Image (cartoon, helix red, strand yellow):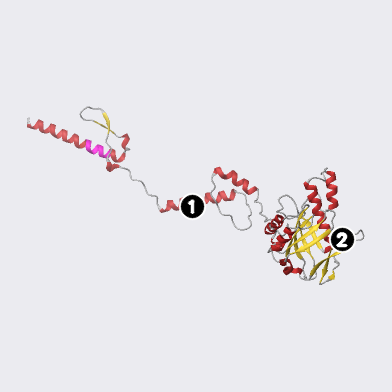
Amino acid sequence: MHSRHGLITCSRLGRYSFHLSTRRYLSQNVTPPLVETADSHRGTFIPSPLDDSSTLKKKKPSKKSKAEAALGVAELSSAADADAPLVKRRGRPSKAVDIPEADTTETTDATETPPKKRTRKPKTTKDQTAIAHGSLHHNTLVEFLDYATAVNLSPTSTVYRGTHYEYTVANSLTRLAFTLTRVGRTSDLGIDLLGSWAIPSRPAPLNILIQCKAETPKPSMVRELEGAVVGAPMRYRGEGTIAILAAAKEATKGVRDAVGRSRLPMAYLNITTEGSVRQFVWNQAAVECALESVGVTLRYLANGESEVALTWKGLPWSSSKSSSLE
C-alpha cells in the first residue's frame, strides 16, 4: 500500500517537473502568443501565461550599422542633387523661409509685381501760390469782358460789377508804379489784389495788399481790411507791406479816422469805376514804413478833370516803370 502510494506520488512529481521544464523551454524558444500547453487535469489546450522574464530584448544597432545608414542617406541626397537641373544664382543666397501652403499664392503675386516707389510731392507754401490768378477763364479786363459776353453774364450782377472794378483798379495803378495781380475769388478772405509798389526810397518794392469795394466806403470796411491782413500769406503780413482799401467814392471823415487809428501801415484810394484816381491818403504807420518822402498832388487833364499824381521830396514823380497787368 505504501509502495503504491509512493509510486503514484513519484509519478505525479515527475509529471509536474516535466511540465515545468517543457513550459520553460517553450517560453524561451517559441513566440509567447503561440505557446499552448495541455492541462493535466482536463486534457484541453489553453494559452500559456506570459512570462515577464521571457520578454525579447531589442537589439541595439551597432556602430557599423549607424555608419552604413548615414552613408546611404548621403548617397541618396547626392543622387537627388545630381538629377536636379543646375541654376546659377547671382548675389547673396536667399534665406530659406518657411511659408505655409495657404500663403503661397499671395507670396507669388507679391514677387511678380515689384512694389512701387514712393515719390514725395513737392511741398507748396502759401507764398508760392499767393500770386495765382483768381480765375481760370480770364486774367485781364479785356479777357473778362469777352468771357462775360460768352457766358451771358449780366452787367448789373454783383459778380460782374465786382470783377470789373478789381481789374479797373489794377489797370489804373499801373501808371503809379504798382504791379498787381487779381486773386479775388470765392473765400478769398477779403483779398482782391496782391502785388508790389516800386518807390524811390526803397531798393526793393513794397508788398501791396488791396481790397476793392465798388461802393461807398464805410469805417467797418477798414476793420475788415485789418482782418484780411491777418489771414494773408506770410509774405504780406510782415514789415514792408501796406494794406490799401480802394473804393468808388471818396473817403468820409469816419473812414479817414479809421485809417488813421489803425496800427497797420494802411492807405485809402478813391478810384472811380471808369478808372480815375481821385484820392490817395495813408496813416502814420505807412509813413514810417516807407512813405516819408512821398507826397500827393493833383494833375489836371485836358477835359477839365483832375487825378492824383505822386511827388518825391516835393518834386513831380513820373514813374519810368510802365508794366501792365498780367
Query: Seen from this angle, which residue lies furthest right?
Result: 302
Secondary structure beneath dot 2 equals strand
In percent of width and height, residue 165 lies at: 81, 53
Q: Is residue 36 above or below residue 208?
A: above
Query: Seen from this angle, which residue lies furthest bottom?
Result: 313
| Residue at numbered disc 1 | 71
Q: Nearer the viewer, mark 1 or mark 2?
A: 2
Mark 1 residue type:
Leu
Main SS of residues in magenta: helix
In percent of width and height, residue 213 lies at: 76, 53
**Looking at this view, is 82 or 42 the one in front?**
82
| Residue at numbered disc 2 | 306
Give me the disc on residue 6. none
Which image quarter: residue 19?
top left
Q: Is residue 250 left or right of residue 113?
A: right
Looking at the rendering, the stretch of residues picked out in magenta corresponds to 19-25
In percent of width and height, residue 269 lies at: 78, 59
Mark 2 residue type:
Ser
Which image quarter: residue 94?
bottom right
